Image (spheres, coloured by chain):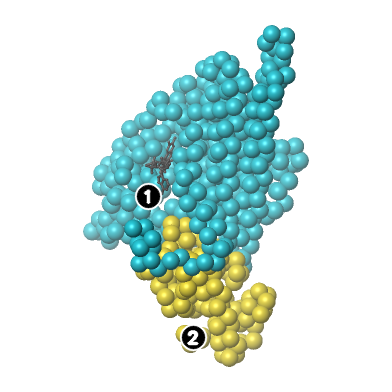
Amino acid sequence: MNGGRSAPGGREAGRGTTGAAGAAGSAAASSPVAAAARLAAELVPHAARWDREGALPAEARKEVAAAGLLAPDLPGRYGGLGASPAELGEICAHLGGVCSALRGLVTVQSMVAAALNRWGTREQRARWLPQLASGELIAGFAATEDAAGSALAEVGTRVEDAGDGGHVTVTGRKKWITFGQDAHVLLVLGKDRGRPSAVLVETDREGVSREPVGGQLGMRAAQIAHVGMDAVRVPRANLVAPAGLGLSHVAAAALDHGRFTVAWGCVGMAEACVADAAAHAAARVQGDEALAGHQAVRSLLARAAVETAGARELALRAARFRAEAAPGAVTETIVAKYAAAAAAASASRDAVQVLGSAGCEPDSRAGRHFRDAKVMEIIEGAQQVAEQHIAEQLLRRSGTPRPEAGARQAEAS
Amino acid sequence: MSDGDIREAAQGGTGDAAAGGAAAEEITRQVTEFLTAALRKPVQPDDDYFALGLADSLFALELVTFVESRFSLTVEVEDLDLDSFRTANRITRFVLRKTGSPEFTETQ
Ligand SMILES: Cc1cc2nc3c(=O)[nH]c(=O)nc-3n(C[C@H](O)[C@H](O)[C@H](O)COP(=O)(O)OP(=O)(O)OC[C@H]3O[C@@H](n4cnc5c(N)ncnc54)[C@H](O)[C@@H]3O)c2cc1C
């Protein structure tokens, strides 16, 4: 569901698989991956402060936007860079290694852009995508509610006919919206007479209120907000896809894209943690012995390195499936996100262990990734939810039909 | 029949109704095969698997991706009236329409 589509009449594709070798170093200097690498190197000294202050400064965002990295996989005619899935992934790994909020900015912007590129009308694509690519508009994805987290079919936000033929009203309360404090437009998942519906809500409309969230476990610089919408009047032209398809198609396309960028962000986090732990273990001496001289420490390093390398390969595999628009792409992306979030969580935990008190310092990168990585195991499909889907795919392959409902009940009792 | 043949058939290379019918049958066969595997339940060409509650939250996206890649076409938002994808026979009709094949009568 992304750039690499090559079907006749399909939306302009990304540059296909040529970016597969986009790993740091092998891409041309002018490539989007190289631009992300340069930006990451430049911004890395600031990330701890952003986390402490709970905000990504406007200048940092402008730099990401100026480099074309907000939705880099959008086709050129919408102002994107046409980045291939592998290139998009490497970009997110570079940014994720520096700061999850920075990567989160790209995740939300590009997931909203991807959903619109996939399911927007020609007019909607022409209207919104160039502004999302340039960063003129910052987008948020607003699905979660108090009673609807993993089970998004339960959303209670109402999309109702405004009675004037040209508008709908949107009423509900969304929680945990990344960059919700200052996003200009939100892709909101609601229900129109019980049917899941997706609608773009500009945040300067009357009836929108925002409650900033601060001091949460991780992603502290992501300017998260809970957002209230009280009968917000929105033109019908802002409805994305017919009512009934807001979750299965629109939100699903956004979340699929989000999982992919989160997966790669986690690869970057895990790689950064392995690098920090190894450097510290080699340099730090206690009682005449470098930490790296202890077998126990070497084991921690080895395990983290192997798990991280495995996550990268699964992320690359997902990128290949996506570049070919292969039917397994959705599942491979879930597998990659699952493995990469787990790798980021365990590599950051082990890195903090090896760093000792240095990993607990307020400005420690490993310590920050440790907090952020836990969040990665919860958002975009919690680990346990991902396992349900992965196991279901496995059962499909076994070719055995599922038992009849009656038989299932009998088994359960 | 190889995938290539199907695509040719789906794209109406021969332009006669009999070929359209054969293509339709083959498309329906492939779609029901995919559905039966994906839903882990034998699916008949006229079964409405959404109504039967067999589809999980990621199924719609997988189905769209399957139809696009297998039949070399692009599903646009304009194609997304809820009904086009409800049954295998409807998907076949959709594929033939998208690929410009001659009209056909539904097979059971
Ligand atoms: C930092 C941060 C940023 C976020 N940004 C956004 C955003 O931009 N937009 C947005 O819409 N939302 C956002 N969220 C919300 C996020 O998507 C939800 O937290 C997530 O979907 C999980 O929902 P929940 O927190 O309600 O947990 P619940 O659904 O209550 O689940 C809690 C736990 O129960 C288990 N569980 C739940 N369901 C199942 C199941 N079916 N099978 C097995 N185990 C299960 C899992 O272990 C899970 O971790 C953000 C959250 C955080 C923390």
In the image, residue A71 above or below residue A195: above
Is the residue at mark 2 from the same chain as the one at mark 1?
A: no
Left or right position of A139 against A175: right
- Tell me which chain appears yellow: B
Residue A233 seen anywhere in this rendered image of the structure: no
Question: In terms of image quadrants, where is residue A102?
Answer: top right
At 64% from the left and 47% from the top, the residue drawn is A314
Residue topped by disc 2: B107
Residue A369 left/right relative to A293? left
The three-letter code of the residue at mark 1 reads Ala
Residue B10, image quadrant: bottom right
| Above or below, comparing residue A314 to residue B86 in the picture | above
Classify mark 2 as within 8 Å of ligand 1 or not, answering yes or no.
Answer: no
Which quadrant would residue A325 be assigned to in this image? Answer: bottom right
Figure quarter occupied by ligand 1: top left
Q: Chain of mark 2?
A: B
The location of residue A332, given as percent across then percent down, is 58, 52
Residue A129: percent from left, percent from top: 51, 50
Q: CA distance from mark 2 to mark 1?
A: 38 Å
Q: Secondary structure at mark 1?
A: loop
What residue is at 72 percent from the left and 13 percent from the top? A289
Residue identifier under label 1: A151
Chain A rendering hue: cyan
Residue drawn at (28%, 45%), measured in percent from left and top? A172
Residue sitting farthest toward the left: A163
Query: Please, what secondary structure does the residue beneath circle 2 have?
Result: loop
Tell me if residue A211 can be seen.
yes
State yes or no: discs 2 and 1 in contact (Cβ < 8 Å): no
Mark 1 — on which chain does it sit? A
Residue B88 drawn at (x, y percent): 48, 75
